[in-house]
Image (spheres, rainbow, N blue to C red):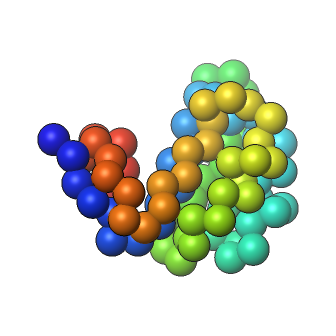
């Protein structure tokens, strides 16, 4: 089952994120932050606040880890289980 997004969304894989903070530093809307918790590798992964992403993709391009950050633009058709 798929759905059409009404707003842009960022999905960050906590297990792929190394907590470098590059995505946080380039986000023009300041909607990303490093979490207080740890992933299984001992890193503080980044997280999306859930609001106000404009889908620019800066976080995706800044991230050195493949599969850590996925950006969905407004109007994208995505599987229901991939985004909240």
Which residue is drawn at the image coordinates 60% and 31% (left, top)? Answer: 67
- Quadrant in which residue 42 is drawn: top right
Q: Is residue 64 above or below residue 80?
A: above
Question: Which of 13 and 8 lies nearest the eye of the viewer?
Answer: 8
Question: Which of 41 and 23 lies nearest the eye of the viewer?
Answer: 23
Q: Is residue 42 above or below residue 25?
A: above
Whether residue 36 is visible, yes or no, is no
Instruction: Check the picture and name the quadrant holding the N terminus.
Output: top left
Residue furthest left as drawn: 1
Q: Is residue 23 left or right of residue 8?
A: right
Residue 57: x, y in percent?
66, 57
Residue 61: x, y in percent?
75, 47
Q: Is residue 6 left or right of residue 28?
A: left
Whether residue 81 is visible, yes or no, is yes
Q: Is residue 4 left or right of residue 48?
A: left
Instruction: Check the picture and name the quadrant holding the C terminus.
Output: bottom left
Q: Is residue 36 above or below residue 43?
A: below
Question: Which of 12 and 3 lies nearest the eye of the viewer?
Answer: 3
Residue 17: x, y in percent?
68, 35
Which residue is drawn at the image coordinates 65% and 65% (left, top)? Answer: 56
Residue furthest top as drawn: 41
Residue 52: x, y in percent?
53, 77
Number of numbered discs: 0
Which residue is drawn at the image coordinates 83% and 62% (left, top)? Answer: 25
């Amino acid at each position: 089952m798929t759905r059409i997004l009404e707003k842009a969304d960022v999905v960050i894989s906590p297990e792929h994120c190394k907590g470098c903070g590059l995505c946080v530093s380039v986000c023009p809307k300041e909607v990303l932050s490093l979490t207080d918790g740890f992933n299984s590798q001992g890193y503080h992964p980044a997280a999306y606040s859930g609001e106000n992403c404009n889908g620019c993709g800066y976080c995706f391009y800044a991230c050195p880890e493949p599969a850590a950050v996925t950006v969905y633009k407004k109007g994208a058709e995505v599987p229901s289980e991939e985004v909240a």
